[in-house]
Structures are given as C-alpha cells and as structure tokens.
Amino acid sequence: MPRKTLWLFLFILSACSEKPLDAPPPPAWVRDVPSDWAAEQKARRQAKAEHIKEFSESYDRFSDFAVSETDGVPYLFLKLLPELAPEFWGDKSNFLSVIGLYIDDRRPNYPLARGIGITAFTRKDLYGDIDYASFTCGGCHIGRVRLDDGSYDYLDGGVNTQHNTVLFRRKVIQTLNKIYAGETDKEQQKQLVITAVRKALDKVQQRDKHYFYKNYAYKDRKFDADYEAKQIALFRERINTAVPVFVDKIEQVYSGWEVLTDKLYSGIKQDVMIGFGGMEDALSFNAVNAYNNLKSKWYTRLFARLPLPSEPGMTDIMAVWEQDKRNPVWNQEQDDLINGGGQWNGHIPLLIYKNIAAQQTLGFDNIDIRVSDHSDRLLDKLPASVYPFDVDLALARKGQKLFAEHCAACHQPNNGKVYRDIGTHMGRARIANRLITFGAQGSFTDACGPDTVTVDIDGQHSKPCAKYKGVSLLDKKKFTMASSDRHDGYNALPLIGIWAQAPYLHNGSVPTIYQLLVPGERPAAFIKGRLDYDKQWLGFSWDPKVASRGDKDEGYLYKPASDPAIGHAGHDKDIRLGDKTFKLDWTHDKEGAMAIIEYMKTI
C-alpha cells in the first residue's frame, strides 16, 4: 500500500474509533533562546499588556465579574464575616487573606480582594436585587511571584497558588457554629444568624457609610453612599430569606464534601477538609451537588452515591494562558476532534465548556455564560507571563538542544496523545466515569446549548456554544465532555510559561523542575503556597528550612508521602516511544538537568 494511502486509512480509522490510535507525535516545537534577555522580557511584557488592553472587557469579566447574576454569597453578609467572627478571618485591610485572596495594587479602590465578583457590575436593573458575590475566574487564575525588591509580578492567566475555596466554606461553617453556640434546632439557628447579621449591620452602618463598597465606581456605575444605603435597605427587607437560603446551601455542600472525602481521601481527611491552597478536586462540588439533590428524593438509597467519583481527583490549578496551543482540531470529516488536550487528561476538549465547568464547580444553579464566553476570547491567545529574573543564555542554549531531544516531542502544542504508562497516580484521569460523563454532558448543554443560548457581547448577539472552529456543534454533545475511555491517562501539556506553574505533576507534588528531573531528590513534604522563587531549581520557594520573605505563616506544609492521591511518583523513568528513548530521569546527568532548567526559564 502506498504511504499516502496508508496514512489516510489510519487517519480515517482513528477518527471513527472511540479510542484514538496513538499516532506518532507531530514535529517538535522548540522556542529559540533570545540573544538579549532584557529585551525579550520587555517585548513579552508589552505583548501581554497589549493583548489585555485589546480584550479589556473580556479581562474584566475574567478577573472581576461574578460567575452568576442570581446566586452566591449575599454580598453584605460576606463583608460582615469579620464582624461576626474576627477570630476566623484575616486583618481588616483584607479579611479574605486567610483563604489566599489578595489586594491587587493595580486597582486599589476595589471593595474586596482580587478574585471576588459582585453582581452589581452586570445586573441590568441596578436596584432590582440584592448584590451577590462569588469567586471569579481570576481568583484562581491571576497569580503572583515576589520579586527581588519585594514587589509582585502579577501572573494574569497563571495560578493563584494560595487560593483555597474549601477553606472559605470551612471558615463560614465555623462562623455559623460560633453563632449557633450549641443550638441544634434548625429554625432557632436561622433566627440566631439573622439576629447576629442585623446587629453587625447596624454596627458598621453607624461607623462607615462606605463600609461595603468603598465608594467604588465601574464605568458609569457608582457604588457611593446612596447606592450603599439602598442596598442595605433592600438587604434588610430580604434578610429573612436570603441569609437562610445561603446558610442551608453552604452547610449542605460542606457536609457533602465530607461524604466525598470519606470515600476518596479517608487517609488524609483532616487536610482535605481544610483544603489545599492552589488546588482543587475538579469534579468534587459538582458531584456533591448531585449527591445532595438525589439525597432529597425517594429513591435515594439506590442512587444517592452513584454520582460520586470512584477515584480521587485532587489536582493543582492550571495556568490558562495560550489556550490555542492546547485546543483540539477537527478531523477531515469534521465529525471528531483530534489532538489537543486542555486539562490534565483532556476530558473536556473545548475551551468554552472548560470555562463553564469551572463556573459550575462552584455549585451555582444559574451561571453567567458571558463570563465563559469572554474568558474564551481572552485566553485563546493570552501570552504567558515571562520569567522575571535573569537567565544564563549560554547555558540555556545547551539546554535547548537537550530539551529538543528529550522533551519537545511530547510537550509540544496541541499534542492530544494520552500517556497511560508514565507512573503517575491515575485517579485524576479516571474520576469521570460514564455516569458522571453523561451527567456533565447534559449539564453543559443545558447551560449553553448550540442553539439555545444567545448572549450580548459588545453590543453583538453571540451564540458561544454554536460552533467550534467554524463547525456546528449541533448533535455533538459528546464533545462537551469526551468519553472516559479516550482519556484514561494524562496529556503532555505544552510548557509555555512553565516556570510559573510550579509545583509540578498534575497533583502539585514536586516543588521544582530540578526535583522532577532528578526524582531521587523529591521531598516527602515541602512548603506550598509561598511567593518567593527558587531561581536555581525553578519553582516557588519550598524548603521548610528556608524562611519566607513574606508573612511568617506564608504557605502550608504539603505532604505527598502521606497518600497516593497526592503522591509524587511518575515522570521518573526513561520511556521508549517507537524507536526512541526519552530521558526523564537525569540523576546521572545533573549538568544536563541544570541546562534544561535554564532553557525552560525562556519558554
């Protein structure tokens, strides 16, 4: 058979098969080492700034806007938390610092930390409802690194390594339990909370007429003393329903989280119930919500536990820049997606649905699709943040050759190959069983179907889920979340901006690239969530014996040796693909490892 005919036959066979063939990887991608690193830094920073300016509306939605217009934490209740229980919340300048959210000095007048959005920014009738707050996309995906002078470089599209959504829920529960003071009757508990909230509201209203909104303005919307007074009055009218509804939901979700923890993380339950900063269990709260919904129905005993994943799925939050280098493409017949990954195992191939999944994971019944649509537009070609420190360019050029030989074939853009024998814990790749996949497909298309959802974007009507790369998504529900059979393993993601994505492996169990390449030196425990940087080994400061330049308690002790779900096995043995062996263990060539590290600073 002629070579051209053979390849066409294999291509068609791969497109028709539910489980794609492991085709040879496309040609390697390697970025050249620049000749002037300072000039390269300047050019890349400028390119990123220009992109954000071009997509400024999308950036606002991504960074600051609530993911639901009708659901979340009642905003005034959120702001009263440090008044209700100061012992559980941070300092007065930023009470959300305890869950890893920070004041972004690029917008000093914002009324809350980076990562919290308020429904007032988008609600059509500004005075038609109380304000709700929720975590924004930027809460997880705008990170920081501390520079040599103590200032911060902001990593738009990167990872907030300190953000902890589980800890937020836990601290709210602790606050409620303080208010309950041992009372077990549900109705009495609600009245105690309402009374406590009213007293706190009276206190702050007398003290500061700008307590809640800090006289903030967004475009033509001014959240001044008049707006604040109207919101307080409306909140007082609705406090008897709004607060109990939120309390019921957060208690239900956190108790459901305990059910999932008992099932999947019993060996490290205490740590998981507190949460890990910069991490998530990707399907956890969706599964918890499904469990709680079924629990209320008459057939609960038979079906209640079915939606829960059968494997642990704890992962590091991912950087989301340059999504075009992760996206899949259509096959020739335009009836199957090939290549491209996305998440760690690529089970949600399309960016719009990855964004929707992130919104739904927060547990809202109604989400604002415009946030996902704008994020899609922003992130597709958002440049990665450039390494902000010096680089040994001569050493990097040596590393470039080694990288091209041993790393680039797998970690090239748009490589959809699934690697099943890399030695990494497979839980994350196996959490989406058939039932979860089927349920997610329905949930995604209900939220954003190809012919049912139209949003207004920059004055234009848009159907964000109608097409992908020019091809209609009608009758293509299976591409909202692909069959678990096709993703029983991990993608080798492109390494653009890899310096900022530490720690490494899907579960954040290896603090630096050096320890990834020299597996015998991976620590059983290390500090995670610091903002100082290890320039030698390429990763955030991790050694418990080295003091942080930030707060004395910055970061937390992460213990990969404590449980296989967060263990650091994998990517630690040389592998053979086809007729070539790729070196993954550089124990006997540490000079080569250091050269690769120097090169990785430049990509």
Image (spheres, rainbow, N blue to C red):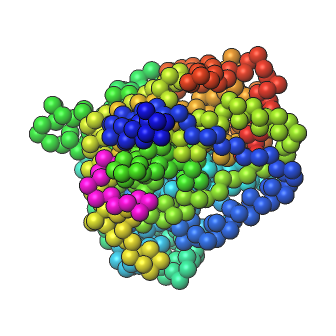
Indicate yes or no whether the magenta region holds residue 470.
yes
Q: Give the quadrant of the N terminus.
A: top left
Residue 113 in the image: state x and y as whole percent.
58, 58
Q: Quadrant of residue 588?
A: top right
Residue 448 in the image: state x and y as whole percent.
33, 60
- Kindly tell me whether residue 244 is visible in this rendering: no
Q: Quadrant of residue 483?
A: top left
Comparing 310 with 429, the one in front is 429
Q: Is 270 on the left or on the right of 494, as rendered?
A: left
Instruction: Please determine whether, in this image, residue 285 is positioned above or below residue 443.
Output: above
- Kindly tell me whether residue 574 is visible in this rendering: yes
Comparing 268 with 90, the one in front is 268
Comparing 515 with 482, the one in front is 482
Instruction: Please determine whether, in this image, residue 329 is positioned above or below residue 105.
Output: above
Residue found farthest to the left:
298
- Residue drawn at point x = 41 percent, y = 23 percent: 266
Residue found farthest to the front:
2
- Residue drawn at point x = 76 percent, y = 42 percent: 601
Residue 253 in the image: state x and y as whole percent.
34, 43
Magenta stretch bounds: 468-479
- Residue drawn at point x = 28 percent, y = 35 percent: 434
Comparing 549 with 58, the one in front is 58
Residue 504 in the image: state x and y as whole percent.
62, 33
Indicate yes or no whether the magenta region holds residue 271.
no
Instruction: Please determine whether, in this image, residue 137 is positioned above or below residue 499.
Output: below
- Residue drawn at point x = 31 percent, y = 62 percent: 450
Instruction: Please determine whether, in this image, residue 603 is positioned above or below residue 92.
Output: above
Total number of numbered discs in the rendering: 0
